[in-house]
Image (cartoon, rainbow, N blue to C red):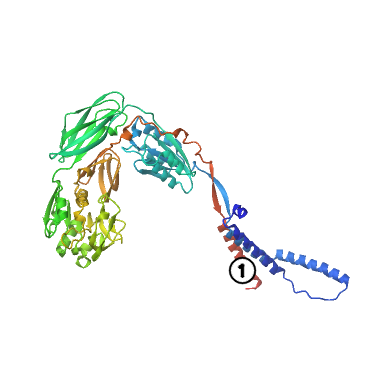
Amino acid sequence: MAIADSLPFIFPLALLGLLSIIPLIILYMLLPKPFKVSMPSVMFLMRIEESREKIYSSLTKIVKDPLFIAQLLVLILLAVAAAGPYILSYDTLSDETTVIIIDGSASMEIGDRFGEAQRDASRHLSRVNTVILASSTPVIIAENVSASEAERAIRNLTPRAVTADIGSSMAMAANMLSARGGSVVVLSDFTGWDGLNPIVAKNLLGSGLNVTFVPYGTPTANNMGIINGFLETSNGTYNYHFMVRNYDAGVKTVSANVTTTLPNGTRLSYAPMTITVPGNSAETFVFRNVSYGTTEIRLMTNDAVDSDNFAYISIPGRQSAEVLYVSSVNNLPSQIALGLIPELAVRRVSEVPENLVSGNYSFVVVNMGDRVLTNAESDALHNYVLAGGDLVFVAGAYLEGPNQTVNMSRMLPIRINETVTRIDGTRIFAVGDDFTSGLDLNSVFMRTFLSAETRNLTSTAYPVMTMDGVPIIAYGPYGNGTVFYVGLNDHSGVNAWNNFASMPEFPVFWVRVANHFAGIGAISEYNVRAGTIITLPNDTEIITPEGRVVTNRILLDSVGIYIIGQRHIAVNMYNDKESNSLAPRLSGLENANEGGELPTQFEIRNNLYYILAILAALFMMTELYLLRKRGDI
């Protein structure tokens, strides 16, 4: 087997099929059966010579027979084709495909590190190129483009206010080059990273890639930045605590300008704060009585990292939104949870108003329990969503299949059949999204629920389901609005459907619902660290610090204010790792490029079996032609 495996065939044992040639030759050489006769010795010798001449004559006749030649070639070609023959050719690696990974972390702002990386990247481009910006998550900037297109894409890049996950970016590059191999060039200062150590990541990739590390920058003490911050409430007011670190050896004193934009657009400027921090240390400062709206604190210094000189605060205005709560029962847990949100005004009605479209509601909650909606009420809700309204249905018998109107059936993101009750209960699980992330929904015990089916896996999200695949929470676009289904009925009493309303996760969930649809909620939802990802139910126009985008998923990787609908989200860097301009370069980097180079060529196996199969078919046709010409068929 060792010898057979070394032959240029995929299935070398199939060559045994060549033995079929022997019966073909014998068939053509068959002679009549010999018999005994008495003859003189001289005649015997003469007959032997004649026999030899007949044998030679037969062999010559066989070789000259075109039908034999055709059949012989068919057998040879089929046997060799079945063995899977191939030939090896060679091609270059780096001259064909290259993936450029540029570190987009905040520390690349120091000096001209990012600019140098952009200029050097053009020297490593090849015929086909992919550009990845290593941010808190890998971002593909350009894929399989020419050198000129890649160069244009690289020119438009800027560093972000995050720590780069270089290891994940390298893994993504390896996956892209898995088919043919190629080169990966990583341009970074290698002073900080999330995930795998870049050298470890390179070793894990194995020998299939030619990975080159290109380092930049030297440590500098010229930086002072805001590395942390949080809001606290005191006697109904908000105070902002923020920590400033000085990376220089000497004491530094700078001014901090503070500006607030009120919800009505009015701008307020405060007296500058004086920030003094001893060398190689950090100090905490407090800005008191933060007003509603968005506030910017800026350290007036020109140093190594610009992103950490800013802190942004977002506090939504009071009573900035109104929700219509439709229920025949007053003070249900979900109504109470929404009413506890200071910025949200809750108006409860027992019937859906006919003029719902003209109402100025941020969203509508329908929680009817057993009372079935009339056709007029369903039509009013339908028109409201078509006009761009956001509607939340809370599970109840009124949503059972027989109780639905045509318009209600169209709106719902699920197909509902009937109400199911299980004495031993049903558990649910959450895949995690903006509404359910971090909530312990595994402890929810459901005794009764609506049996339902998924409807549209492309446009509808199903973040919470039972173990049997019944959707419990689902939402998706309809018309110009959104329909949200909550399968956790919160009506209390002996026949309560579940225990969710008694859990601490319950009010958090409804705060997130209000935050999503009305742009209000917990203060922490408005003040996040750079690197946070927000997922939306459909494409939405978002105003970022760099401009406007339309998307349903956005990475908040720049410091500043992001505006999503009515929400103003403050994004801060808060990253001592990236602000540390004295951080040393990755140890062992000087030898990281040694021994990792691939040969300038790699093997390509070109299969030949299909060519031989075509030739065999042609000779089969030739054989049929010869048989027909002889009159045998």
Residue furthest to the top in view is: 250
| Of residues 428 and 103, the one drawn nearer to the viewer in this rendering | 428
Image quadrant in which the C terminus is located: bottom right
> Residue sitting at 45 percent across and 41 percent down?
202
Residue 138 position by quadrant? top left
Viewer-side residue, 278 vs 143: 278
Position of 483 relative to 195 (above/below): below
- Camera-nearest residue between 77 and 622: 77
Q: Where is residue 632 in the image (x, y as percent from the top left)?
A: 64, 73
Q: Position of residue 592 (x, y in %)?
A: 46, 36
Other residues around mark 1 within 10 Å, as few (<14) / some (14–19) / many (≥20): some
Using residue 274 as the reference point, say whether residue 43 is left or right of it: right
The residue sitting at 16% across, 29% down in the picture is: 271
**Label 1 element class:** helix
Residue 538 visible in the snapshot: no
User: Residue type at mark 1?
Assistant: Leu
Of the pair 464 and 547, the residue shown nearer to us: 464
* Image spot of residue 130 (x, y percent): 42, 43
Residue occupied by mark 1: 624
Among the 4 quarters of the image, the one containing residue 220: top left
In the rendering, at what x and y percent does residue 55 appear? 77, 67
Count of number-bearing discs: 1
